[in-house]
Image (cartoon, rainbow, N blue to C red):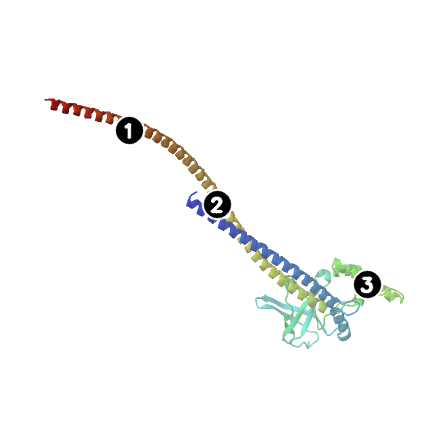
Amino acid sequence: MSIWNKILLGFILVASLVFFWLAARVLKTHQYWRATAVKLEAELKTAQQQEVLLREGDDSAMGVREAKLALHELMVDRGRVWRNARPLQVRADNQGVNLRVATDLPDPHGIPVKAVLYIVEENDITQGGGYLGEFTVTGVGEKDLQLVPSLMLNARELQRLQQSQGPWSLYEVMPVDQREVLAELDEDEIRAMFPDTTEGEYLADRQATSAAEAGPDAPKPARQLRDYEILFGEHHKLRSMLSDQMAAAGRDLEYLEAALADAKRQEQFRRDEIARLEQEKTEEIKRQQLVTAHLEAVQAKLAEVQTGIEEVMEENRKYAGELARIQLEATRAIDAQTRRMAQASGGR
């Protein structure tokens, strides 16, 4: 194996170790956040149970809502009402919502700046009448008022306010829930006024109220009266919190989607890198096989050449022995000839 093959295998081993370490870190992070999520869910559930207990109460203690309703019944009356008010202008821009209302009864109207008014459209509920919202007086004219919403309006509430043509009733105090008002309505009016999820409760309360008025032995109404000011305030807070949570969830979702997209890109990059390395590995194996085959051919050729060399050397040894024999015979013949010549020269 060549040095480059060893270096490549070393790089592959190091990359594998890095991948294993990253996978272990991801698993550890997942385990940590999952444990944290379970812990936070348990704490949230406990907090929600405590919130429900504080808000609704139980047999041993009065809840916050029930205490507020009881206090409201003891301390709050209907307050003043300005009827037949007319919307003059509803302007909504980036500065907020501004409302201009005309009113002539009573004259003077006697509404001070910073007063809080609850606006109710006087049309029938089937014609779009109903509660429009809570507003704070910011300016007072001789026969008109400038108001702004005390609570932020959503798009649906703003559209309803802009489409309303009046007449309006301006309440100094939020109208209270009264059984006597429902007793004066028939079933069709109650069904039109309340959603399907609660109309059965109000119909049963109306029937119980009518029966109670008919005789002392009749069953008493069981429905708990509602303080709509508190309920609207609580609903607005919940809506605001849900809106914030939805916005935060949207941001988290965008972050997670971006992180997921980045993770997918990283995954695709790693897959491409693995595919590339697998291809390089396959090509390297092919090259290794070619080198091995070439090496075997070279070794076979070398063995053949070595065999030929040995045969040549053996023949050379034979030729060298034969040459030595011939040289020895020639030397002897020359010596014999030299002796004969020497003898012949001495005899003369």
Distance CA(mark 1)–CA(mark 2): 61 Å
Residue at mark 3: 206
Name of the residue lying farthest toward the left: 348
How many badges with numbers are in the image?
A: 3
Q: Judge from the rendering whether residue 87 lies leftward or rightward of residue 4; answer left or right.
A: right
Residue that label 1 marks: 320
Q: Are marks 2 and 3 in contact (CB under 8 Å)?
A: no
User: Disc 1 vs disc 2: Cβ atoms closer than 8 Å?
Assistant: no
Earlier sequence position, callout 3 versus callout 1: 3
Determine the secondary structure under disc 1.
helix
Residue 166 position, x and y percent, is 68, 66
Residue in front for this viewpoint, 37 or 317 = 317
Which mark is drawn over residue 277? 2
How many residues crowd mark 1 within 10 Å: few (<14), some (14–19), many (20+)? few
Give residue 59's position: percent from left, percent from top. 80, 67
Looking at the rendered structure, the kind of residue marked 2 is: Leu
Percent from the top left, x then y, of residue 210? 84, 64
Give the residue displayed 75% in from the left and 58% down from the top. Answer: 197
